Image (cartoon, rainbow, N blue to C red):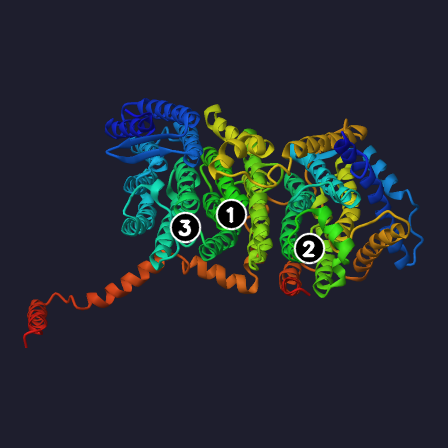
Amino acid sequence: MNPLLYPIVIPFIAGLLLYVIPRRVKGIHEAAALLVSAGTFGLTVWLFLQKPMEWTTQNSLILRLDDLSAFILLAAGLFGFLIALYSVIYMKDRNQRSMYYGSLLLTLGATCGALMSNHLILLLIFWGFLGITLYLLIQSGGDGAAPAAKKSLIIVGGSDALLLLGIVFIYSLTGTFEMDKILLSFNNGLVTWVFVLLALSAFAKAGSLPLHTWIPDMAMHTPIPATALMPAALDKLLGIYLLGRMVLNLFQMTGAMNLFLMIVGAVTIITAVMMALVQHDLRKLLAYHAVSQVGYMVLGIGTGTVIGIAGGLFHMLNNTLYKTCLFLTGGSVKYRTGSTDLDELGGLARFMPMTFLSFIFAALAISGIPPLNGFVSKWMVYQGLVELGREGDKLWVVWLLAAMFGSGLTLASFMKLTHTVFLGDSAKRAGRKIKEVGFIMWLPTVILAVLCVLFGVFAIQVPLKHFIIPAMGSDIEYIGSWSPGLATVMILIGIGIGFLIYLAGNLKGIREADSFIGGEELDSETRVTGTGFYNTIREMGMFSRIYRWAEDKWFDVYDLGNHLFSGIGGVLSKAHTGVLNLYVFWFVFGLIVLLIVLMGGSL
Amino acid sequence: MNAYLAYLVFPGFLFTAAAGMLASWIDRKLTARVQWRVGPPLLQPLYDFVKLLGKETIVPKGSSKITFLLAPVLGLVGVTFVSTMVWSAMLWPEGGFTGDLIVVLYFLMVPSLAVILGAFASKNRLASLGASREMKLMLADELPFLLAVLVVIIQSGGSLKLGQLMTYQQSYGMILGSVSGVLAVVVAVLTMQAKLTLVPFDIPEAETEIMGGVFVEYSGPPLAVFKLTRMMMLITMPAVLTLLFLGGVKFEGWHILWSLLKFFVLLLLITLIRNTSPRVRIDQAVRFFWGPVTVIGIVAVVLALLGF
């Protein structure tokens, strides 16, 4: 068997076996999932070192591992393992364990398959299969999850139909299904459609506007590790992988197509982060950020400049790191407090120091604070946009403004989260002691947070050099100019200066005292939770109306479709009165019409 | 080694601290003259700083101590970084790197971020309220400030390097000399006032209603570091504006006086605005910045794109 098949076949077999093992058998699911995901991770590392690899059968190139898919495969393997590790404790008392772990492994296998497929039909099969495992993973959230699971399946599965249509068009244009033989240029109206169809299916997977609405809904009901696995990590990798593949290999890009991508990207960044700003639930807030960050990737890839595309791909990698970390820390909070409602949380930093530490690094990384990883990729995307301007484009100003201001809004909503969950006043002042989660649960979050720092500080030496630049196939200009290593040393020195000032001062006599609120005694009911921090913005003229529309789901494709079809169905259902005579009448009437039409030629 | 020296001594930490104290003294002296007082002696900012160092450090009960004590230091790092990069670009325009403008813009947010984190860690309602205002104020001024910076990038032909932005202005005339430049400077001066959280935008502190807000729990050395950060910002923000809009500085003959004059005029503007206006509410501030100021910014960007 070709080694490329291992990371697909092994998780598949193990996953299917886990479905049939009854849940009364304790421990076997966890052990198998952990073992297989660790093995898959090891395999992806080995494959990464062996690239490029190919598997040809019956004269067609079926599987291919090149520079672009190899590093994404590696990332997918890492997330599969870390999330399986985290789930061992998080899911231990749940009923749906066999479904959960089985789906987790199937997801992992299908992801590896989709990333390595060179044959479009095979890609479509894995792509569609991931929609089903997503459905099953959401269903493992228990009773309330069914509507969200249905919605996700319809949006993600519906986008598979778009992909299928796109592939059919590709075959009719080129006569082949093998991706390495396809290079389409926009000289035919059909090619534009192909691009849009493929891009839409990538958007649905990655969760970009307009097909993002499944993510906030499913995040509310799915077990948090599953949310961290699919929309935060693997689906992002897959969606942006497809987009990257299209832009780098399948299409000869033109200005109009790039413009389409940039509009989608910029709108996604701003609208999703504005929604995140006013959320009241930890999971939903994170889910909107999972959408918003896709905007940066799409925008970067849409610039069409080398540094912009590289920035978009790097942002994909960085986003999966900090986003998964954030979701997992959110999971730890839920595990210990039993809630993700921001009004019921607060003051956890003292009780859960490791979780807080991972959270704050990931939060600063997603907000693009230098020298963390989010900054480097955003910095590259911005450079791509300015380069676009140098080439004569006028709209780059709009994109740059959306991207940079979106970054500020991201910071704002994470500051709100920091306050309401970890700092600030605790919800119930008296008594309740909350413990830090166990080692197995905080270890994955800490690993991810450390990776966020390392990928920022050593951005040029490690991720860009080994992952991104080989995938781009060409060297990137001015990439070596920002030196995050030096900046980090400077920051550490600066912190040293600060502490020297402290030491010079009177720091010996630290005294603890109650906080001072003008001498008043206030009960814990009047504490500032922070959920209302941005109500000023929410209530401002135009924004209040837009927020109301958004909450009534006027911007949700799924609900709009629902209204549309139930509207049409409502009209048509009037014909179904249940009166048999009427049906017979329609039947005869139809036959007559048919007869007339068929005989129309001879009459 | 040079980079470290630049960071620690000149034009980094020590220089900026000294210049910041001087700027703070000028501000206080001018304020005093506006109010028909004599004003403090030259070294008063230093005395204040040293006095705070000697005071007791009080940490609120049940707060996250490390965050509480680390936050002021982070702010100090942020302002030192910005100052080092901006001054280095003005003194040695060939140095620096492509995209350092973006680094400066991000580090400019760090002092505010530090204030917010420190206030959150204070576990005090007034501080929380103040911090939420600081955050909103930051959002409010960020949008028009970015627009103003875009004008500079457009006029210089798409450069993201601080040194190039200055040399461009020194050979083709300062940004202020064009129509779009004038509008951009108006926007930038207004946002500068908000970034320094000075009246009329001292909403996060608002002594008369939330008793210093973000700083309410701070005392002793941590407060001293926050105050020092603010003094350093008072000279760093004018430096950023001088570099971006007023053609930077040049240390040759008469140019020295001319360069100093730019700083002094900006400081004078800051002081006069803060002495002649009342504090606004946070929603008014957000409306102001996202409304008329942003419109001016957009007009400036469009004019710049059209070549005015």
Task: Report, in whole angstroms, how far the alpha carbon at label 3 lies from the one at label 1.
Answer: 19 Å
* Tag 3 subunit: A
Q: Amino acid at mark 3?
A: His
**Going by the image, does A369 lie left or right of A577?**
right
Q: Position of residue A130 (x, y in %)?
A: 32, 40
Circle 3 sits in a helix, a strand or a loop, which is it? loop
**Going by the image, does B29 lie left or right of B87?**
right
Circle 2 sits in a helix, a strand or a loop, which is it? loop
Q: Nearer the viewer, mark 2 or mark 3?
A: 2
Tell me the residue that label 2 is attached to: B156
Q: At x 81% / y 62%, what residue is drawn?
A: B276
Quadrant location of the N terminus of chain A in the rendered image: top left
Circle 1 sits in a helix, a strand or a loop, which is it? helix
Above or below, A528 against A553 in this view is above
Query: Is A580 in front, or is A459?
Result: A459
* Tag 2 subunit: B
Task: Report, in whole angstroms, how far the alpha carbon at label 2 lies from the one at label 3.
Answer: 38 Å
Tell me the residue that label 1 is attached to: A300
Q: Nearer the viewer, mark 2 or mark 1?
A: 2
